[in-house]
Amino acid sequence: MKRTVNNSRNEMSNLYRDTPTQAMLSSSALRRTQLTASHLTSKQPSRNLSILDDSSSAMTSQRKLKILMLHGYTQSGPLFHAKTRALEKNLDKAFPAAPKPGHLPSYPGGVELVYPTAPLKLSISDIPGYDVDGSKSENEDPEAYAWWRRKGDGEPFTYEGLEQGFERIAEVIREKGPFDGAIGFSQGGAAAGMFASLLEEGRRDAFEKQQSQGGMRYPESFEQDTGFMTDVIQQPLKFAVSYSGFGAAPNELYTAFYEPKIKTPMLHFLGSVDTVVEEARSLRLVDACVTGRGVEGGVARVVYHPGGHFLPSSQKQYVAALVAFIREVVGGPPEDSLENKKEEKAEDMDMPF
């Protein structure tokens, strides 16, 4: 009788004890539960972060040095592009995409030049010397544009349509920017200096202060509402370059562009026999820059060439000056990829402006 009771107890106990198969199933289920929880809490975010990291890395590897190219009075974006193809090719050689020698570490994608057309369409009467002998038709519609029209018979001139010019530049920034630098010729050189100035820290305050004394308002197109505060449309430029450019006429309307002085590093090319823009006007822009004519031990910031009113885009020494300047302000190895340049082709030579 005692054995029977014990056997019954053992049988009852076994009913509540896992069999080896049940234990294995329970353990397996537990592991699946743990793996599922682990997958949801750690694996998935890790994979998402990996995707983001890969995307960020890809964007960095494709980053290009973006330069806004501003044409001169009576020109257009396509025409300026055609006249500076040699410069574009030389900059491509000087700043190639990684891993080619000479590439800029911060811009492994190489260099990209953007050529917008100014918004103001010019008529024959707006173009000095266009119809000297009266042979042009009154209905002729030249493809000539400007960032502004100069008004007045003498200094101080006023610039009609200047706000429209900056509206166009702001459009290009939103469509194809942000930009790292700007290169301009003649009126475009003057615009490059103004463009660099507008993006600098504290410049809006300078405009606000000068506005109470008759100065122009800070261009509304360059302001950007972030939802918390009004900011500038993009970060300051790293550099600007002026070919035969000039400072605005001494007029209280435009004082805020140059006071305080422009901090952005700026390189100036002047033609020694330029009869279109007087040297004094070009030096007005030079002296409006903090670095002015250069910094001790650095690349010269004023370069004279023996020509007139044009952009020397293929002459080796002037291209080298531009390349050295960009390397100095952007950062990068000092290799000159133009040293082994082959004989120039006709299409790579300078075109008259």
Image (cartoon, rainbow, N blue to C red):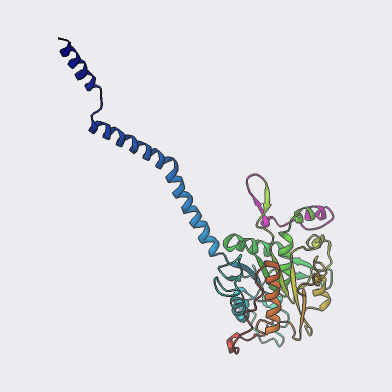
When the figure is inspected, residue 54 is found, relative to residue 281, above or below; the finding is above
Residue beneath the point at 76% across and 70% down:
150
Can you see residue 287? yes
Splitting the image into 4 quarters, where does residue 256 fall? bottom right
Residue 2 in the image, given as x and y percentages of width and height: 17, 10
Can you see residue 72? no
Farthest residue to the top: give it. Answer: 1
Magenta span includes 217: yes
State the extent of the magenta-drawn residues as a range.
207-228
Q: How many marks?
A: 0
When the figure is inspected, residue 342 is found, relative to residue 332, above or below; the finding is below
Q: Is residue 98 toward the left or the right of residue 335 in the image?
A: left
Splitting the image into 4 quarters, where does residue 267 fall? bottom right
Residue 197 in the image, given as x and y percentages of width and height: 74, 62
Residue 146 in the image, given as x and y percentages of width and height: 68, 71
* Nearer to the camera, 125 or 290: 290
Residue beneath the point at 63% across and 45% down:
227
Q: Is residue 54 toward the left or the right of residue 242 in the image?
A: left
Magenta span includes 166: no
Quadrant into which the C terminus falls: bottom right
Quadrant into which the N terminus falls: top left
* Nearer to the camera, 180 or 29: 29
Residue beneath the point at 69% across and 69% down:
147
Residue 23 in the image, given as x and y percentages of width and height: 27, 31
Splitting the image into 4 quarters, where does residue 247 fall? bottom right
Residue beneath the point at 70% across and 75% down:
324
* Nearer to the camera, 349 or 58: 58
Q: Is residue 39 toward the left or the right of residue 67 in the image?
A: left
